[in-house]
Every structure is written in structure tokens, then in C-alpha cells.
Amino acid sequence: MKHNNWQGFKEGVWQEEINVRDFIQTNYRVYEGDDSFLSGPTERTSELMKKVQSLFALERQYGGVLDIDTATVSSLTSYTPGYIDKANELIVGLQTNRPLKRGVNPFGGMRMVRNACEAYGYKLSPKVEEEFRFRTTHNDGVFRAYTDEMRQARKCHVITGLPDAYGRGRIIGDYRRVAL
């Protein structure tokens, strides 16, 4: 079966079955040109970036963290939109309601989020502590699945790389603004 939207692509197994690898291998072309097709930042982007750079400098003066909201569990809906310069932004909305303000994500493990907050002079709020008394974090779930032998091997550093250490991402979000 041929589709009109396949025009311009080389034929392959990808047309008969779902096979992304074959599509890429069959239709991939090496680009041997230069970077002349790229353009620099617009004036608006440059002005926004100056503001962000000044916030980065302020953040460094504060020891690496400008602010942490220790009372709100980070989610898609936990913050109202935040802006650097609302009137000049095309891609809008920060991870929290203020630029470079960090949110906490205790779903990875409470001890880790507590330690991360304390490393920057903050204390996790009793409200979040109480909320997570009755929740299973990623870390809790993984450790429940471990056998006694696995726990001993991990404690002695015989085995490393288990999902409790690598599967949860950052606990205090450092989500820099990137235009995609």
C-alpha cells in the first residue's frame, strides 16, 4: 500500500510494518554543508537573556539557589504561570511562579528531598512531610522490592546502579528555560 504522504521517501520495510529504524536508515542523508543557514538571536531574545544572566549572577551570590518553595509539591498545576518578561516572551510559563525559583518533587524519596533542601539552607515544610507520610515514593517502592540479600549487596557497594539511585531524576528542579 502506498500513501501520498510517503512521496519523496525511499521505499523500505517501514512501509509494510512499523519500523522506525528502517525508515531512518533508508532515508537518512548526511548533511555536509556549513552553519550558514543558522541565524543569531533576535533583539528580543538578547534582551530577555540579559535579564536571565543577571538572575544567574544573583543566584550565584546566594550560593547556587535563589529560592526554593519548600511547601508546594511540584506538579503541572501547582503553580500559576511565571515569567521573566511577560510582554516580550513568545514561549511562556516557567516551572514555578518566579524565575529560578526551585520546586520540590518528593516522589523520588523524602530523605533525598530533605537533604537537598538542607544543603541550601532550607527546611522542607511540615505540610509536605505530612502529605508524604501516606504516600509511597519511588525510593520506597524500589526498596520494598529488594530482597535482604540485595540490600546487603547494595550497602556493601558490591552492586551499584540500582533504580533507587538513578530512576528518579532531580529532586529540586533546576529547569532552565530552553526554547524547543
Image (cartoon, rainbow, N blue to C red):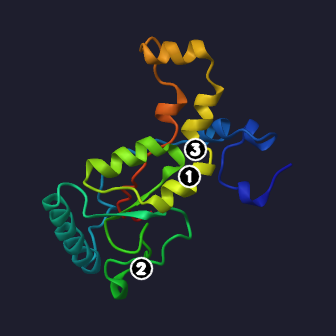
Amino acid type, mark 2: Leu
> What is the three-letter code of the residue carrying label 1?
Phe
Q: Are marks 3 and 1 in contact (CB under 8 Å)?
A: yes
Q: Nearer the viewer, mark 3 or mark 1?
A: 1
Q: Position of residue 143 (x, y in %)?
A: 58, 29
Q: Which mark is residue 78?
A: none
At 17% from the left and 70% from the top, the residue drawn is 54
The residue beneath circle 3 is 137
Expressed as whole percent of the image width and height from the top left, the position of residue 145 reads 65, 27
Q: CA distance from mark 3 to mark 1?
A: 8 Å
Q: Is residue 18 above or below residue 67?
A: above
How many numbered markers are drawn? Answer: 3
Task: Left or right? Give the position of 172 relative to 6.
Answer: left
Decide which of tag 2 and tag 3 comes sooner along the chain: 2
Asked whether 123 or 67 is in front, the reply is 123
Question: Which residue is at the far bottom?
Answer: 87
Q: Determine the residue positioned at 30% across, 67% down.
A: 39
- Element on which disc 1 rests: helix
Identify the residue position indicated by label 2 in the image: 90
Q: Count neighbours of disc 1 (C-alpha within 10 A) and say few if under 14, some if 14 to 19, many if 20 or more.
A: some
Viewer-closest of 34 and 67 = 67
Which of the marked residues, 2 or 1, is nearer the chain's N terminus?
A: 2
Cα–Cα span, label 2 and label 1: 37 Å
Residue 2 drawn above or below residue 21? below
Q: Is residue 116 left or right of residue 11?
A: left
- Which of labels 2 and 3 is toward the front? 3
Is 62 on the left-hand or right-hand side of 174?
Answer: left
In the picture of the structure, the residue carrying the numbered disc 1 is 132
Q: Nearer the viewer, mark 2 or mark 1?
A: 1
Quarter of the image for residue 126 reads: bottom left
Q: Is residue 100 above or below residue 47?
A: above
Residue lying at 75% horizontally and 36% vertically, measured from the top left: 13
